[in-house]
Image (spheres, rainbow, N blue to C red):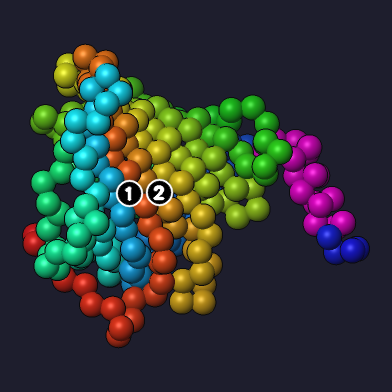
Amino acid sequence: MRTVSLVVLISLQTLNGPQPDVQSVVSAVSRNAQEFRDKLPDLVCTEKITSTTLESGKVQKQKIVESLFSVLKSREYREVFAVDGKAVKKTSNLPDLPVDIGGTFSFHVLLTFLPQYLKDYDFKFEGNADPAGTWILLFETKPDQKSLKWDLDGSRIAKDSGKAWIDIGSSEVVRIERSLLNLPRKYQEWKVAVDQAPTLIGGKQLWIPKTFRTDITERDSQKTASFVAEYTNCRKFGADVSVTPATP
C-alpha cells in the first residue's frame, strides 16, 4: 500500500509540477526513436489491412487482406495468406486495393522524431500534461524545409501539422496524428493516425504500433477513402516463422 501511494504521489507531482522545456521532451522521445530504429529485434506480427472507398458514406469498394508482417534487419516484409476472409496462395505482394498506402507501421513516428528529422519541425506543448499522464506535442514542418517530401501524384514538399501524445513515464509515443497540407488539387484532406502500446518482444518491452490509419477526402467531399492496418500477436521472429521477402 505504501509503494502504491508513492507511485501515485510521484505521478501527481509530475502532472502538477512545472512544465519541462519542450526541447528536453522532444530530445527524450528522439533518443527512444533512435534506439527503436537501431535495436529493434527481428519481429513478426499478424497484420489485417482494410482498404475502403466510399461515396456519400456508402461503401463503393472494400478489400480486407491478412498477412504476416515482419521487420527483419530494419527492412519490412509481408506474406499475404488471406484476402476477404479466403485463404490464398502465399505471396509477398498485396492485391490491388481500393486505396493503397505505403509508410505504415512505425514510419510516421520515426519520420517525426528520429534525430536527423528534428531540424525540419517546430514543436510546442498543447497545454499542460493531461490526467492520463501524457504530454501533447504539437508539431509542424518548418516553412523552409526541403528534405521531407511525399509522393502524391508526383513529389511534393511536405507541409504538415499534427500532434503527438507522449507518455510521461517512458517518453514514448502513445499516439501520433498528422495532416498533410500540401496536397494535389484532387484532395481536400489527408490525415494519418498511429496508435502504439508497450509490447513484450523477446523479453524486452517495446512500444510498437497497434493501428495505422489514413483517411482521405477528395475535393468532392462526398468521395472518401480509408486505409486501416491492425497489428496483433507481435513476437520475436524465430525458426517457426517463415516470411517471403517482398519483391524489390
Residue 223 picture location, percent across and down: 23, 21
Determine which of the numbered discs, if any, sits on residue 229 in the image: 1
What is the secondary structure assignment of the residue under circle 2?
strand
User: Label 1: how many residues lie within 10 Å, few (<14), some (14-19) or many (20+)?
Assistant: many
Residue at horizontal 38 percent and vertical 33 percent from the top: 178
Q: For label 2, count other residues whose C-alpha is less than 10 Å away and answer few (under 14), some (14-19) or many (20+).
A: many
Q: Quadrant of the C terminus?
A: bottom left
Q: In the image, what residue occupies the spot 27% across and 70% down?
A: 72
Occupied quadrant, residue 39: bottom left
> Which quadrant of the structure image shows residue 18?
top right
Whether residue 13 sits left or right of residue 60 in the image: it is right
Can see residue 101?
A: no
Q: Amino acid at mark 2?
A: Thr
Left or right: 119, with 188 as reference point: right
Residue shown at the point (40%, 38%) measured from the top left: 193
Q: Residue furthest bottom?
A: 239
Labels 2 and 1: the sequence-earlier one: 2
Residue 71: image quadrant is bottom left
Outermost residue, top side: 220
Q: Is residue 29 above or below residue 224?
A: below
Image position, residue 61 (x, y; %) = 18, 35
Residue with the mark numbered 2: 211
- Tell me where residue 196 appears, x and y as whole percent: 47, 51
Q: Is residue 153 magenta?
A: no
On the image, the x and y values in percent for residue 171 come to 57, 51
Residue 10 in sight here:
yes
Contact? badges 2 and 1 (CB < 8 Å): yes
Residue farthest to the right?
A: 2
Magenta stretch bounds: 5-20
Q: Toward the viewer: 79 or 19? A: 79
230 lies above or below 242: above
Q: Is 240 placed above or below 234 here?
A: below
